[in-house]
Image (cartoon, coloured by chain):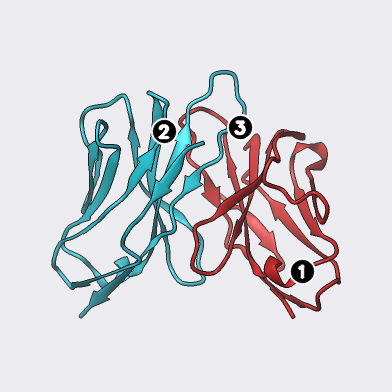
Amino acid sequence: AQTVTQSQPEMSVQEAETVTLSCTYDTSESDYYLFWYKQPPSRQMILVIRQEAYKQQNATENRFSVNFQKAAKSFSLKISDSQLGDAAMYFCAYKTILAGGGADGLTFGKGTHLIIQP
Amino acid sequence: EAGVAQSPRYKIIEKRQSVAFWCNPISGHATLYWYQQILGQGPKLLIQFQNNGVVDDSQLPKDRFSAERLKGVDSTLKIQPAKLEDSAVYLCASSLGTATGELFFGEGSRLTVL
């Protein structure tokens, strides 16, 4: 079974600064997907960024980028120019790739609470 | 496009009582998931449906939890009887069911068991 570890329960950053959230995972599969989801207080979880394991190029979405190190099984999220609206719980998640359907639910880490200081 | 709808948003019950949560996925999404998120933890998958069939319910406590997805659309998750440790947010998510499919989450149903 796959596991996802987020070793930072809480991170704090000044507005407009850059912050990096860490994530490591364990799997025996060679192809899979990795995600970062954002969960604001009492609001629904939304996708921030997605990385396909077979792609060497790191994914980027505006101010959000990842550092994907497949050999090290590491998947960190970098948030540049932090904004007050970025304050939330951030979850790293793993998704297996299955041909023909099957059990493919996300496996989540415990999350990192990101605080943005004005 | 309407998102994933869940109800009720909040529910408080006494232990040993029963409760049911409802989820309406995004139109056309074949795959539906129920997750349990205990305070301070990441969501844990309880059950996955593909259309109206169960794909994975390995982590569902079947002695007290049940779920169904009639006609492959709406889904209901029931807990009977509830225990204190069932206090959590129950998240419903749906996806198109493709390998790269993003999961879209509802706002969740927060259960407090007293």
Number of disc labels:
3
Q: Is residue B80 toward the left or the right of residue B105 in the image?
A: right
Q: Colour of chain A?
A: cyan
Q: Secondary structure at mark 3?
A: loop
Q: Is residue B110 in view from this perspective?
A: no
Name above or below for residue B107 compared with residue B2. below
Picture quadrant of residue A28: top left
At x 20%, y 31%, the residue is: A57
| Nearer-the-camera pick, A37 or B41 | B41
Please name the residue that numbered disc 2 is placed on.
A27
**Mark 2: amino acid:** Thr
Distance between the Cα atoms at labels 3 and 1?
A: 27 Å
Question: Is residue A1 left or right of B73 when viewed as pictured?
Answer: left
Q: Around disc 2, counting alpha carbons within 10 Å, would you say few (fewer than 14), some (14 to 19), or many (20 or more)?
A: some
The colour with which the image depicts chain B is red
Quadrant in the picture for residue B96: top right
The label number, if any, that marks residue B102 in the structure image = none
Q: Where residue A103 is drawn, which disc sits there?
A: 3
